Amino acid sequence: MKRCLLILTCTIFINLVFQYISFGQEIKSNLTIKEQRLLDSLLINKKTHFSFKDKKVAFISGHSGNEINHKDYFLKKFIFDYLDKGINPVISYRKLSEQERQTANGYDIIVMQVPKIYTPRQHKANLKNLAKLAPVK
């Protein structure tokens, strides 16, 4: 009985560990039409002739702008929670060049909670971290 319990516990633990590890590897980036329109409307004053339609989007937060987030988490925490309180979300975006897109595993744009400081060094580190993620389908 103890052996079965130990095997069951180990199986559950290993499963949880792999789920935790794979969370960062399965970042959703394709936006629904509603999400595209929402981001377009929120960032309309900050962009020129750009649309989120059919774009692969990476979501980043953190004081240093270095935490890659799951789309659903980012939208809830940094957009919907603000909108529910009647506050404009403090987000920005950075459109990636063709070379940066190739480095960043095909992402077209980075949407981020506005960090305190975002240096070129941090940007390069984010591109490298995006490259480590599984390709987005």
Image: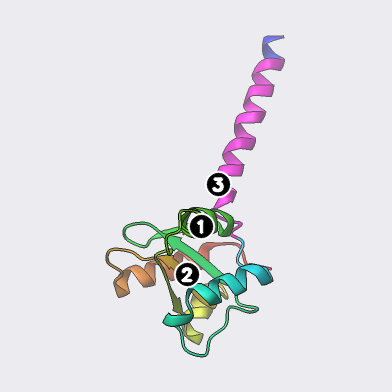
Dot 3 surroundings within 10 Å: few (below 14), some, or many (20 or more)? few
Residue furthest to the front in view is: 86
Q: Which is the main secondary structure of the residues drawn in magenta?
A: helix
- Confirm whether the magenta stretch covers residue 26: yes
Identify the amino acid type marked 2. Val
The magenta span reads 4-27
For numbered disc 3, what is the local secondary structure?
Answer: helix
Q: Circle 1 is placed at which residue position?
A: 74
Work out whether 61 lies above or below 38.
above
- Is residue 13 visible in the rendered image? The answer is yes
Instruction: For marks 1 and 3, give the one nearer the viewer.
Output: 1
Is there a contact, CB below 8 Å, between mark 1 and mark 2? yes
Pick whichever of labels 1 and 3 is earlier in the sequence: 3
- Residue 118 in the figure: left or right of residue 3: left
The C terminus, quarter of image: bottom right
Amino acid marked by disc 1: Phe
Q: Label 1 to label 2, Cα distance in Å?
A: 9 Å
Quarter of the image for residue 66 reads: bottom left
Q: Is residue 31 visible?
A: no
Residue at disc 2, secondary structure: strand
Q: Amino acid at mark 3?
A: Ile
Please report the residue visible at 52 percent of the width from the left and 90 percent of the height from the top. Answer: 49
Q: Quadrant of residue 29?
A: bottom right
Q: Earlier in the sequence, mark 3 or mark 2?
A: 3
Q: Residue at x 38, y 72 (%)?
A: 124
Residue with the mark numbered 2: 111
Q: Secondary structure at mark 1?
A: helix
Which numbered marker is on residue 21? 3
